[in-house]
Image (cartoon, rainbow, N blue to C red):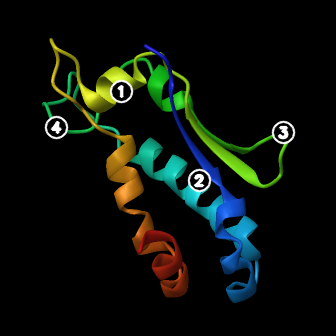
Amino acid sequence: MSPVQVIVDKRKLDALAVKFPNGVAGVIQKICQDTEADIKTNFNAVSPAPPGETPGVVTGNLKNSVLSEPDASNDQTWWLRIGAEYGAALEYGTMKMAARPFLLPALRRIPDRLPEGAIREIFE
């Protein structure tokens, strides 16, 4: 199974550049970095975690594989990567294992951290 990744392309959000002091770059960077921090701080203390809850930490491999970074070849794009090869299996579950989502719950909490105008522009 391939690693999970979220690509946030700020070129599609140019309208935000006019409305926010740090422009689109600041909003996109904040989304990626806040999501990374949210994921890393919300892993379960119990492993294996109950189905439907965030995964538990045993070795820290999954937790340490979460990384947000700007694209090296395109400063208009930020990446949020889940490098552990089993990240997608935990996020979505498999035929033999219930999901233990960690990425989608973190993404759903993003609107609570953004300026109101950014929320309307991005999420509506």
Circle 2 sits in a helix, a strand or a loop, which is it? helix
Do the residues bearing badges 1 and 2 touch, measured as CB atoms within 8 Å?
no
**Residue that numbered label 4 is attached to:** 52
Q: Which residue is mark 2?
A: 32
Which of marks 4 and 2 precedes in the sequence? 2
Q: Where's residue 48, x and y in %?
A: 20, 22
| Quadrant that contains the C terminus | bottom left
- Between the C-alphas of marks 3 and 4, the distance is 35 Å
Crowd tier of the residue under label 2, counting other residues whose Cα lies within 10 Å: few below 14, some 14–19, many 20 or above: many
Residue 85 image point, x, y percent: 47, 16
Amino acid carrying mark 4 in the image: Gly
What's the mark number on residue 57?
Answer: 1
Q: Give the CA separation, mark 2 to mark 4.
A: 23 Å
Query: Nearer the viewer's eye, disc 4 or disc 1?
Result: 4
Label 1: how many Cα within 10 Å (few below 14, some 14–19, many 20+): some
Residue 8 at what x, y percent from top left?
61, 52
Q: Residue at x 27, y 38 (%)?
A: 54
Mark 3 — residue? 72
To which quarter of the image does residue 22 belong?
bottom right
Residue 103 badge: none
Q: Amino acid at mark 3?
A: Ala
